[in-house]
Image: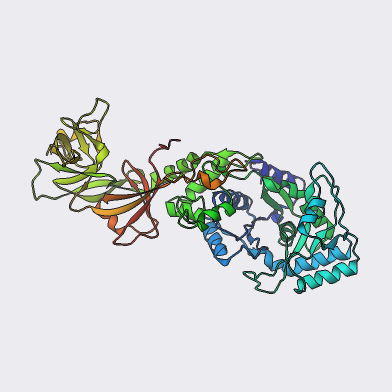
Amino acid sequence: MESKPENFIEQIIKDDLSSGFDYKKLKFRFPPEPNGYLHIGHAKAIGLNFGLGEKYGAPVNLRFDDTNPEKEETEYVKAIKEDVKWLGYNWSEETYSSDNFQQLYEWALFLIENGKAYIDSQTSGVMAEQKGTPKTIGKNSPFRNRSTEENHKIFNEMKNGFHNEGTHVLRAKIDMTHPNMLMRDPIIYRVLDKPHHRTGHDWKIYPMYDWAHGQCDYIEQISHSLCSLEFKPHRDLYDWFIDALKLNTKTLPVFPKQREFARLNLSYTIMSKRKLSVLVEKKLVDGWDDPRMPTISGLRRRGYTPKSIREFINKVGVAKRENVIDFSLLEFCVREDLNKEADRKMVVLDPIKLTIANYPENKTEILESEDNPEKNLNKKRKIPFGKNLYIEREDFKEEANRKFFRLTIGKEVRLKSAYIIKGLGVKKDGEGNISEVICEYDPKSKSGSGTEQSLRKVKGTLHWVTQKESIDIAINSYDRLFKEETPGANEEADFLKDVNPDSLQLISAKAEPSLSSAFEGETFQFQRKGYFTVDKKSKADDIIFNKTVSLRDSWKQ
């Protein structure tokens, strides 16, 4: 309990504990709305709340804020639970705002009976005009002084489905001149005749977020309700509702405290579920888990690891002010993790034939190459080697300057885990394009053989695969989903105009045969190229890899 706070939220908790708050009553929650898939921004809130739970040994609830049946689905509930578990966190209780619909309704009756809520029968447009502006005060509704009996009667009729949507709302009676516009008689309930994913057709009215949020925190006895910065203006209302109810402090002694932190903004990315859903609906991406999406499921499909995302969240930290984090930091974190964990393989993405003129015609050798020297220096894998190979087209130039350290005529390079070769010549097709590279090898230069020639140093090392034993694989190579650092930054601009039309490149590649047994979600380092993960659509006869990240930050604006 005496450890130094790492951020201002922890300082708040430390101050509360120093003021006499019982640390055994510390309790946190992560309250997503099940109206879409979680994204990397949610990972920050997840990491903060569950991280505090781990630090203080406090329970953390996973609460679904399901008060809007028009947009919420069981599919999203399932996906959210899977994402939180995948990140490595376990919740104490799985709760739903809908668990408390009856209690919230009864508390709304309590406000009516105590003159703190009333039924307004005006249109939404008229009510919006009466609210005023930040510089002008609002005007009272003509229904503000409705009798308790009439308010009670209409509210019950709303609940029982006697009124159409838009005819009545229940508003809190606070202050239409309040400088915080959210305090100008906010709506508590509206009529909404839509089936709910858990309660079906039981309810014809649904609570607004601001009403349900704080009361559910109180019911669950959450000590610190941590929200993103846009909810800071809502704090006055949060506190007013809890105070107005005069709840039973003997039964539920903890009054939750709302505090706000800056949400995560990532360059070349959007963090709006509404906008992300547009990408899905317009089929600009392959669903919510498209590897270009910033969703947790998309990052998982692309090959990001829970450890890398948690490390990213730690590096970003918890701030009081909004800022934009460079996407390259996220890539750095996954690159660091995969460098330690991913086995190495040789894959040629743009193959050109290489023939070793002096290698025996029908000979096939089985060579050894390290799997992952970062993880296990002694672990080796078997790879076939022969006369006819593939190398990367960019690794050969017929004529090259002194700074080109790959294969060219008359110069030597080493084939990874194999032999030193020297370029001799080329074969060209009818259009003058190089179709095959001819070279010779030094039979005594085999890697690891211990001969003097094997220890000879050359400046370049190339990856390769055999023509006979290599297998065909497909690769989804990804770039940023958006061309602009802040998509749709201009409020008048359509963020879809910033979508990068070249964010996906399909590549047919040649791979070493050991990858034929790769399974969904398995990640490898393709030597000299980057990290790649087996896609969920991959099959035994159609192996598909998603590019996770390059070996180094090579992205250019």
In this rendering, the count of numbered labels is 0
Q: Could one spot residue 159 in this view of the protein?
A: yes
Q: Residue at x 58, y 54 (%)?
A: 273
Q: Position of residue 466 (x, y in %)?
A: 19, 49
Q: In front: 149, or 512?
A: 149
Q: In front: 272, or 52?
A: 272
Q: In front: 383, or 268?
A: 268
User: Image quarter for residue 502?
Assistant: top left
Q: Position of residue 133 (x, y in %)?
A: 79, 45
Q: Could one spot residue 254 in this view of the protein?
A: no
Q: Is residue 197 above or below residue 80?
A: below
Q: Residue farthest to the top?
A: 402
Q: Is residue 498 left or right of residue 338?
A: right
How did the renderer colour the structure?
rainbow
Q: Position of residue 21 (x, y in %)?
A: 75, 50
Q: Is residue 197 left or right of residue 248?
A: left
Q: In front: 368, or 551?
A: 551
Q: Is residue 501 above or below residue 399?
A: below
Q: Position of residue 412 (x, y in %)?
A: 18, 32
Quadrant location of the C terminus? top left
Q: Is residue 115 above or below residue 268?
A: below
Q: Residue at x 54, y 55 (%)?
A: 278
